[in-house]
Amino acid sequence: MKEFQIIEQYFAGQGPMRKDVVLGVGDDCALVQPADDKVIAISCDTFAEGTHFLSDMPAADVGFKSLAVNLSDLASMGAEPAWMTLALTLPEIDESWLKQYCEGLYEIAEYYNISLVGGDTTRGARSITITVNGQVPESMALTRGGAGVGDWVYVTGTLGDSALGLDILLGNRDAESENKEYLIGRHYRPTPRMLAGQSLRGIASSAIDLSDGLISDIQHVLKSSEVGAIINVDQLPLSKALISSVGQEQAIEYALAGGEDYELLFTVPDAKVGALTASLNYAGVNYTRVGQITAGRDLELSFDGRTYVPQQNGFKHF
Ligand code: ADP
Ligand code: MG
């Protein structure tokens, strides 16, 4: 199969087709029609074999996750997904891998209604780069920079599951089969918190998605917003599967330093807590208050009122 045949078979006219795509895959550029009253949110993430995924990761899960991690960035800005491009580098044409990759990719693309409008297909070490484009009403976009002293700090979902899932896959840990399935599922198929992000428009003062671990990612908010924070580690939302597999002490470590949860961390001024409750309960989003923004620049961790010293500090690529 030649490059153009692959494009024809797997990428042209595949997945959900939005009405605002004027011209999709097949020309030198795609043409899209943005909404009048919105700005475009753009984000790009690479997913490289060996670095971001293990070589035996099921191809359908690779497809799902390579888009999920990008959608998570749109979610944290409060944007709605619209269009994406896919730069795919493959060592050889493995049609069975490609078919399954596309199944996972289009499954999540359908769910969030994002159209594949272009890309590039090349040979080399297996790597996937997706650029997502979303839309958000100007002035409604959530950034890392708006947290104010006294704002409450929240996270969606539960933390640490994905990192334990990875440790199980690597053979560093074990768990009961039911928990194992859930934890590996959280690692392979993270849920981008799209509805949560959109529901936080006009309510959250700042937001970020948790990709490198809470301790690491919250620092970006503190830096951009020029504030500090106290996090009560005894309040971190932990799944039953995580606690029953490693115990509460280690579960807290996974929640603080483990990467790839793709949950949202956000801050809300006290005056908007009522609006937050109404909006997120209406959207059916699970969320937990875990701390508060403070004056100064430091991140303080506390357990039952005493200073908590973590064992690790989150994932750094370099
Ligand atoms: P060019 O030489 O102009 O870059 P290509 O031959 O690389 O064109 O691509 C032809 C068309 O197929 C373009 O519209 C491009 O966006 C699209 N395309 C190529 N690879 C992919 C892919 N992996 N996913 C989606 N669209 C792709
Ligand atoms: Mg090209």
Image (tube, grey):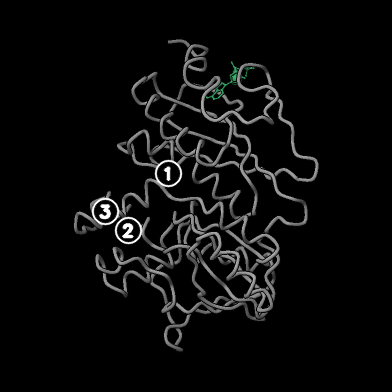
- How far is the residue under mark 1 from the one under mark 2? 15 Å
Q: The residue under label 2 is which amino acid type?
A: Leu
Task: Give the residue furthest to the right.
Answer: 36
Quadrant housing the N terminus: top left
The residue tagged 1 is 52
Residue 37 at x, y = what percent? 79, 45
Looking at the rendered structure, the kind of residue marked 3 is Ile
Q: Which residue is mark 2?
A: 164
Labels 1 & 2 near each other (Cβ < 8 A): no
Q: Residue 168 shows which numbered tag?
A: 3
29 left or right, relative to 53: right
Q: Which mark is residue 173?
A: none
- Neighbor class of circle 1 (other Cα within 10 Å; few <14, some 14-19, many 20+) is some
Mark earlier in primary sequence (1, 2): 1
**Which residue corresponds to the image point at 55% horizontal and 36% vertical from the top-left?**
130
Q: How many discs mark residues in the rendered view?
A: 3
Give the left or right position of residue 204, taking residue 120 as reference: right
Tag nearer the camera, 1 or 3: 3
Circle 1: residue type: His
